[in-house]
Amino acid sequence: MPQRGIERRKAAAFIGSLIFLIAHGAGAQESSEEHFRSVLVDYFKPLRFVPVLVNVGYGIGDVIDIDGISVLYRGKTCFPRLKLHEEYPQALPDLIEVKDIGMSFGLRLRRLFDSSTDVELNRAIHIRFDDTGVVAVTVAELRKSYDRAACPVIAPLLSGKPEQSSPGEHPYFIVGAVMYGRHEAMLRSAGNASAEASAHKVSAVVDDANLKVSAQAGSVISLSSRVRVPIALRPITIPGLVKPGDFEIRGGGKGKGEPNPGDLWQWQDNSECESANSRCAARFADLSQAMLQAPMVLSNEMRDQ
């Protein structure tokens, strides 16, 4: 079979997998983890970032599965000569309200809401981020420091050519910017205890020197991180819009199931995309939607982080 035909079939399979995720995932009942991911994705979407749900030490140049969690390659492997810029400040909206997030999110929340503890807390939580800043690079800088021999499969994401993907394989993205900050959860006592008494119990259960617990006005308890960690990632490139009707995913079309000539899944620069650009915002929304529908597999250890 000619090489061009193989590449077109692979591109069609990649697009087909995204279409399937978007079309078939919406009707499933959301778990607490999936709901939390959805809330965070919507929170960071206007900034063209995707949230970090579980911190596994993300960095610039890392290649991440569309689930936003799994690391396929580390940046130091694919871009060994990359030089990073200084961090710049990044303002964020004030609060996120969420109920029963189902994971610790760097704040030991699973331990707090475990049924075996005697801390009575309302499961409605407000999350916010403090001391936030961004370290970023450009596509040109990544291309210049790219070691193709070490990570050949990511070449299409840097060159803008169609993504090459085997059937059933999840798409992935390259991290072009990392947002750092501190997590804070605003909790509310569900019992008759004072905020001071509840805060004392929370401190005993959390038992982590990296976390600060304090009583606030009324029945509110603040649980915050003393350590700055990655809180969101920006893909260096995002996919161009693709009309599903342009592809014969199941065969029977032009060229024995190959996509129509000229229709390609292009990866376009995200680092220089202005927020006011509606076409760019639509492309990033498509990527965010694919992330929401991708299976999220979390071990208990990950949920406890």
Image: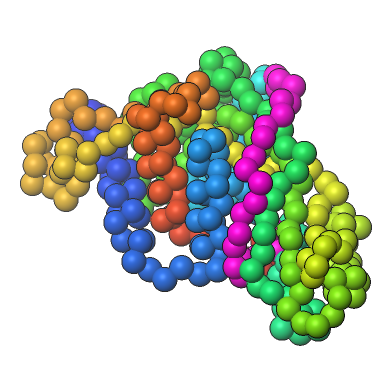
The answer to whether residue 204 is seen in the rendering is: no
Side of 234 relative to 59 (left or right): left
298 versus 156 height, above or below: below
245 versus 270 height, above or below: below
Using the rendered view, name the quadrant where residue 208 is placed. Answer: bottom right
Side of 191 relative to 210 (left or right): left
Measuring from the top left, give residue 46's x and y in whole percent: 50, 38
225 versus 91 height, above or below: below
42 versus 279 height, above or below: below
Using the rendered view, name the quadrant where residue 25 is placed. Answer: bottom left
Counting the numbered discs, the total is 0
Residue at (80%, 55%) from the top-left corner?
A: 224
Measuring from the top left, give residue 86's x and y in whole percent: 74, 22
Residue at (57%, 20%) from the top-left corner?
A: 138
Measuring from the top left, give residue 93's x and y in whole percent: 62, 43
Overall secondary structure of the magenta section: loop
Residue at (45%, 54%) from the top-left corner?
A: 292
Side of 65 relative to 165 (left or right): right
Q: How is the image coloured?
A: rainbow
The answer to whether residue 290 is seen in the rendering is: yes
Q: Is residue 299 magenta?
A: no
Q: Is residue 90 magenta?
A: yes
> Range of the magenta residues?
83-105
Side of 248 relative to 42 (left or right): left
Name the image quarter holding the C terminus. Answer: bottom right
Measuring from the top left, give residue 225's x and y in whole percent: 81, 52
Residue at (86%, 75%) from the top-left corner?
A: 194
Using the rendered view, name the quadrant where residue 222 is placed. Answer: bottom right
Name the image quarter holding the N terminus. Answer: top left
